[in-house]
Image: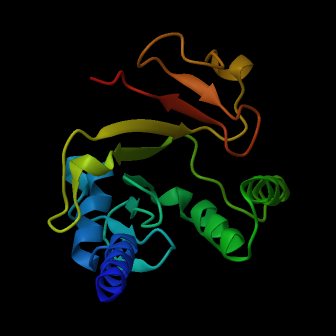
Amino acid sequence: MKAFLSICLILLTVQSWAQTPPGKEIQIKMAVLAAPEDQRANATVYAFDGTLLRKGSNQTVCLGDDPSREGLSVSCYHISAQPFMERGWALRKDGKNAQQVFDIREAEAKSGKLKLPDSGSLLNALVADEKDINWTTGEVKNSYTRSVIYIPWATAESTGLPLKPAGPGLPWIMDPGTHRAHIMINPARD
């Protein structure tokens, strides 16, 4: 019985450790991996929940990984998207689901209450599989980065972009005609 209880205690300890986010410096190190290299040192960095980890001095804002999900997923974007991001954080904290967040931000953008990202502002999202991440050192192997260029309200007709990629790495428009319209660029994976 003691052996069984010891095993259960070890499993609970390992499970709670696996769900604990890495320290602040590691979160920052990993979050800025999505930024262009020349913008990393001076980027502002937030934890996934919107907690400020580091105030930067350039136009780049990075968002850390969600520790409740397996693998790594971080992003960096132009500062003009910050009001849009902050509104999403607030709505999710209020318990809104993804569709409600979309609908509320859409209505607020149409009314002028919510400032949208500048047309042409960039967001990069970097992901990696759990097996390729060292959560202690912040080292990441075999990551993959895709890019988004915000073009609010744009459509396939106004841009000439297709509604789905015509081939690996080719751009396409997602969420056309909405506040969240953007060009997707998904490079081919190795």
- Whether residue 168 is visible here, answered yes or no, is yes
Left or right side of 134 for 107: right
Q: Is residue 27 above or below residue 159?
A: below
Outermost residue toward the top in this view:
166
Q: 38 or 11, which is in the foreground?
A: 11
Q: Position of residue 56 (x, y in %)?
A: 31, 71
> Which residue does the image show at 50% across and 74% down from the upper left?
50
Q: Is residue 132 above or below residue 27?
A: above
Q: Is residue 150 above or below residue 50?
A: above
Q: Quadrant of residue 141?
A: top left
Q: Quadrant of residue 173?
A: top right
Q: Position of residue 58 (x, y in %)?
A: 32, 63
Outermost residue toward the front in this view:
1
All told, the count of numbered labels is 0
> Which residue does the image show at 35% across and 38% down from the upper left?
145
Left or right side of 183 for 115: right
Q: 157 or 88, which is in the foreground?
A: 88
Q: Position of residue 109 (x, y in %)?
A: 77, 55
Colouring rule applied to residues:
rainbow
Q: Position of residue 48 (x, y in %)?
A: 47, 68
